[in-house]
Amino acid sequence: MQARKVIAPAEVAQPFIDDYLAYLLARASHLISAEFHVVVRRTRLPVLQWRVLATLADGQVSSIGEVAAIILVPQSTLTRVAARMVAAGLLLRADDAQDRRITRVRLSAAGLKLAAKLVAQARAHEAAVVDGLGADDAATLKRILRRLIEQHAGAPD
């Protein structure tokens, strides 16, 4: 009788995607955002409107194009979202004084009030998310992410 050869299991390589930075960033963003979107949906506010509120929560005036770039949607999509927000009394819209092709937006008093409430909830959610990281790691992660964004902000879409 011949002895059987024991075949060692091949070393399983980690799947590419599990170590791919772009995937890890997107997956973390998706999971964390989905958690907070549950809170947003309780207000019956669409997520894109929450993003506009969050962007303009400090009372600033911005162009539709600037806000669209920040919330990562096409300008045409934001134009439709803005129209719904104006109709709901959350947003004020005006043509730019120097260039009438540019539309400026800012939150109304009702929009500012709703934004303040949701931003407070978003800050609490963020605190819970980073709690397991610790303050130093959370600050380091944010610093690195800001650096990545700065390095790649001019890259073609």
Image (tube, rainbow, N blue to C red):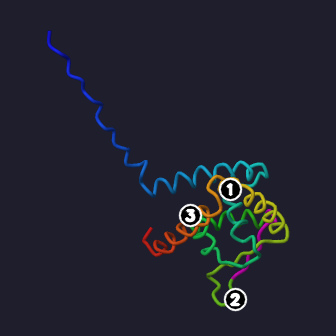
Upstream in the sequence, badge 1 or badge 3? 1
Q: The residue tagged with tag 3: helix, strand or loop? A: helix
Q: Which residue is mark 3?
A: 141
Number of residues whose C-alpha sits closer than 10 Å to that of mark 3, classed few (under 14), some (14–19) or many (20 or more): some
Magenta residues: mostly which secondary structure? strand
Which residue is outermost to the left?
2
- Quarter location, residue 61: bottom right
Left or right, residue 120 beside residue 71: right
Number of residues whose C-alpha sits closer than 10 Å to that of mark 1, classed few (under 14), some (14–19) or many (20 or more): some
Left or right, residue 148 beside residue 46: left
- Quarter location, residue 74: bottom right
Q: Which mark is residue 68?
A: none
Q: What is the spatial separation of the Cα atoms under label 3 and label 2, in whole angstroms?
A: 40 Å
Left or right, residue 18 beside residue 59: left
Residue 14 coordinates in the image, percent (x, y) = 37, 44
Residue 124 coordinates in the image, percent (x, y) = 75, 57
Q: Which residue is mark 1?
A: 47
The relative height of residue 99 versus residue 64 in the rendered view (above or below) is below
Mark 3 or 2: in front is: 3
The residue shown at (67%, 63%) is 51
Upstream in the sequence, badge 3 or badge 2? 2
Boundaries of the magenta span: 88-95
Q: Which of 80/18 is in front?
A: 18
Upstream in the sequence, badge 2 or badge 1? 1
- Quarter location, residue 64: bottom right
Magenta-colored stretch includes residue 87: no
Q: Which of 59/123 is in front?
A: 123
Q: Which residue is mark 2?
A: 97
The C terminus sits in image quarter: bottom left
The residue shown at (63%, 81%) is 102
